[in-house]
Image (cartoon, helix red, strand yellow):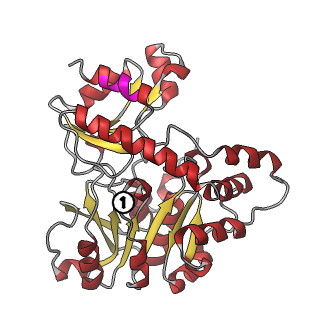
Amino acid sequence: MKDYSHILIPYIQELEPDEAGPDPSFVSAKYGIPLEKIIILSRNENPFGPSPKVLKVLNGISLNRYPNPTEFIEALSIYSGYPVENIVVGAGMDEVITTITRLFLKPGDESLIPSPTYGYYSNAVKLCGALPIYLKDNFSFHIGTEVLEKVKIIFLCSPNNPTGSVMPEKTICRIAESTEAIIFLDEAYVEFAEKHLIKLVEKYDNLIVGRTLSKAFGLAGLRLGYAIAPELIAKQYRCVAPLFSISSPSLAAGVAALKDLSHMRKSVAKIISERNRLLNRIRGACPSQANFLFIKTAEKSKKVTERLLSQGVIIRDCSSFPGCGDHCIRVTVGTTEENNRFLELFAQH
């Protein structure tokens, strides 16, 4: 086979594959555990699933026409309280992130990323030939103006993945007022938190707030992301984003889910209740405002995750997150039964 690697863009060759933790099919084959008996607590999914109204609406979707996101965007407008002119959408948060970076980054630019945090930010930055600059401690200290002058995009995640911690509003305001860089505030887990900061888009012209229907709404399999942005940025986003990237079934599901907020809020309440129970039971667990717990372990994280993996419970080894070290794991809050199984196995060390 002919090798075409010499014509690849150099910075593309430096990319590492994005990681989501072990594949359940691989775990099943390796350890001889039936797939249906494997408990997945590694991907921060909603164990209770979407509204029943989502399943009903999927039967009537016309698949011979290209998708139209208008109704979905209108539903997001009602939910977020922002006009449709400020709303942009993508096939999951990752497409929103990738599109934003394509708007503002060129080869040689820099992007500031807290550490540890969601790994896809750095991949999106590198795809543009730009340089990710990692900042430890999640912006809890002052950033020098000489650093900010070189930066085009700053990524913030609150609640943060993988730690579950939230960033104070005053910190975000201080950053926004200290730079002309674009600030992307990732609120993927905000429905599980005590407070959201979407209102700051009205105050700062350089702030974009990204969200998803993958977590609280239980639609991870349908890839629905969106962002609230200043109108000028939203207009430019639509020029760059793929026109038909979100499928018709996904759009219809999103509308149905947004019309059944009661279901979403009930499942969020159950997850928060289970999260608090786990927090009180696990030594080393850190307070969280997301649908997962960040746990500091005495054993190396790889050893802990492998031990649970061999017994059919998949959790996330956080050593792949820059800045996490090798003694931290992340555990998604599952159903009561799933959480009890995790507690039982985690205690066996």
**Is residue 194 shown above or below 206?**
above
Residue 215 position, x and y percent, is 49, 49
Residue type at the position of mark 1 = Ser
- As drawn, 343 above or below 84: above
Q: Which stretch is magenta?
A: 338-343
| Quarter location, residue 346 | top left
Residue 261 is situated, as x and y percent measured from the top left of the image, at 57, 55
Q: Kindly identify the residue that appears in the image at 34 percent across and 80 percent down.
A: 181
In the image, what residue occupies the spot 67% across and 65% down?
Answer: 72
For the stretch drawn in magenta, what is the main secondary structure? Answer: helix
- Whether residue 105 is visible to the viewer of this picture, yes or no, is no
Q: Quadrant of residue 56?
A: top right
Judge the density around disc 1: few (<14), some (14-19), many (≥20) Cα neighbours within 10 Å: many
Q: Which residue is mark 1?
A: 122
- The N terminus: image quadrant: top right
Query: Any magenta on residue 106?
Result: no
Which quadrant holds residue 81?
A: bottom right
Q: How many marks?
A: 1
**Helix, strand or loop for disc 1:** helix
Front residue of this view, candidates 240 and 207: 207
Residue 340 part of the magenta-drawn span: yes
**Residue 173 in the image, given as x and y percentages of width and height:** 28, 78
Query: Of residues 280 and 88, which is closer to you in this image?
Result: 280
